Image (cartoon, helix red, strand yellow):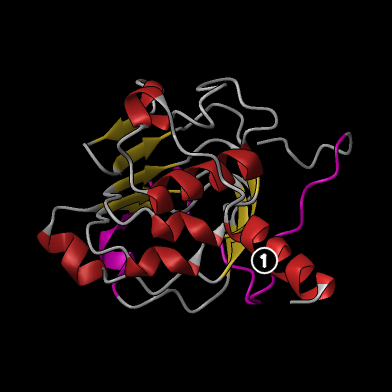
C-alpha cells in the first residue's frame, strides 16, 4: 500500500470518529445519540447560560435534558440564550419525544430530520429567529399522542403554506406563526440596530 493510500485511509477514519464518547451518567447513550448531542452543543451553546459543560455528558444537565438508559428523550432548553443553528444531526436522537428550544436566539431553519423521529410529540421553537419551511411533521399522530407545538412569536418568519395539520395542533400562545412567503432562512439579526426588540 502506498503512503498516499495510507494517508487517505487514516484521514477517512479520523473524519468518521471525531466525536468523543459520552461519559458519566451519559456513558450508556447510543453513539449516534451522543454524537448528535455533541454537534447540537457545539452549534448552539456558545453563549448559553444553562447546562454549560455538558458536551460529553448531556444527561448531567438535569434541568434541561431527560434520558433513559440508551437515549435522550427530552431536551427542554428554553430561555438559556442558545445561539446559532440547530444541526440536522439532531434527527439521530431516535428516542427524542420533546424538543423545547423556545425563547432563545436560534437562527436558520427547523431541521427536516426531525420528521423521522417516531416518538417526537412536542416541539417548541417560539420566540427565536428561525425561518424557512416548517417540516411536514405527522401532526395527526401528534394529536393521538397528545402532542404540542409552538412556532410563532419573536422574529420567527416561516414560509407558506404551513404543513397540513399544523394549524390544528400548533398553538400561537407566544404570537402568530408569521410567514414571509419565501423559503429562505431568516437572516441573523444585526446587533445594535434594534432588530432584536420584542
Locate residue 178 relative to residue 47 in the image: left or right. Answer: left
x and y, in percent, of residue 108 in the image: 65, 58
Mark 1 nearby-residue class (10 Å; few <14, some 14–19, many ≥20): few
Which one is nearer the viewer's eye here, 148 or 115?
115
Quadrant in the picture for residue 128 = top right
The residue positioned farthest toward the right in the image shown: 192
Which one is nearer the viewer's eye here, 58 or 44?
58
Q: Is residue 33 above or below residue 118?
A: above
The residue positioned farthest toward the left in the image shown: 144
Residue 177 visible in the shown view? no
Of the 4 image quadrants, the one containing the N terminus is: bottom right
Which one is nearer the viewer's eye here, 97 or 54?
54
Is 95 inside the magenta-drawn segment? no
Chief SS of the magenta region? loop
User: Would you name the residue on which mark 1 appears?
Assistant: 12
**Magenta range:** 165-191
Residue 92 visible in the shown view? yes
Locate residue 112 relative to residue 142 in the image: left or right. Answer: right
Residue shown at the point (33%, 24%) measured from the top left: 25
Of the 4 image quadrants, the one containing the C terminus is: top right
Quadrant in the picture for residue 173 = top left
Q: Secondary structure at mark 1?
A: helix
x and y, in percent, of residue 71 in the image: 29, 44
Locate residue 42 relative to residue 114 in the image: left or right. Answer: right
Quadrant in the picture for residue 109 = bottom right
Residue shown at the point (40%, 49%) measured from the top left: 31
Is 183 inside the magenta-drawn segment? yes
Residue shown at the point (48%, 79%) measured from the top left: 161
Q: Is residue 180 above or below residue 23?
A: below
x and y, in percent, of residue 91 in the image: 42, 60
Amino acid at each position: 500500500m502506498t503512503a498516499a493510500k495510507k494517508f487517505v485511509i487514516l484521514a477517512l477514519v479520523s473524519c468518521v470518529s471525531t466525536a468523543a464518547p459520552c461519559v458519566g451518567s451519559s456513558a450508556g447513550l447510543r453513539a449516534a445519540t451522543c454524537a448528535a448531542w455533541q454537534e447540537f452543543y457545539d452549534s448552539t451553546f456558545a453563549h448559553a447560560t444553562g447546562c454549560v459543560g455538558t458536551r460529553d455528558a448531556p444527561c448531567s444537565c438535569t434541568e434541561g435534558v431527560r434520558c433513559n438508559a440508551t437515549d435522550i428523550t427530552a431536551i427542554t432548553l428554553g430561555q438559556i440564550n442558545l445561539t446559532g443553528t440547530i444541526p440536522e444531526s439532531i434527527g439521530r436522537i431516535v428516542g427524542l419525544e420533546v424538543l423545547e428550544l423556545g425563547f432563545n436566539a436560534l437562527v436558520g431553519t427547523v431541521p427536516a430530520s426531525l420528521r423521522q423521529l417516531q416518538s417526537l410529540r412536542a416541539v417548541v421553537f417560539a420566540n427565536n429567529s428561525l425561518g424557512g419551511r416548517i417540516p411536514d411533521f405527522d401532526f395527526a399522530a401528534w394529536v393521538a399522542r397528545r402532542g404540542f407545538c409552538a412556532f410563532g412569536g419573536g422574529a420567527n418568519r416561516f414560509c407558506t403554506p404551513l404543513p397540513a395539520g399544523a394549524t390544528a395542533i400548533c398553538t400561537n400562545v407566544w404570537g402568530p406563526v408569521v410567514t414571509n412567503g419565501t423559503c429562505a432562512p431568516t437572516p441573523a439579526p444585526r446587533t445594535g440596530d434594534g432588530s432584536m426588540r420584542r
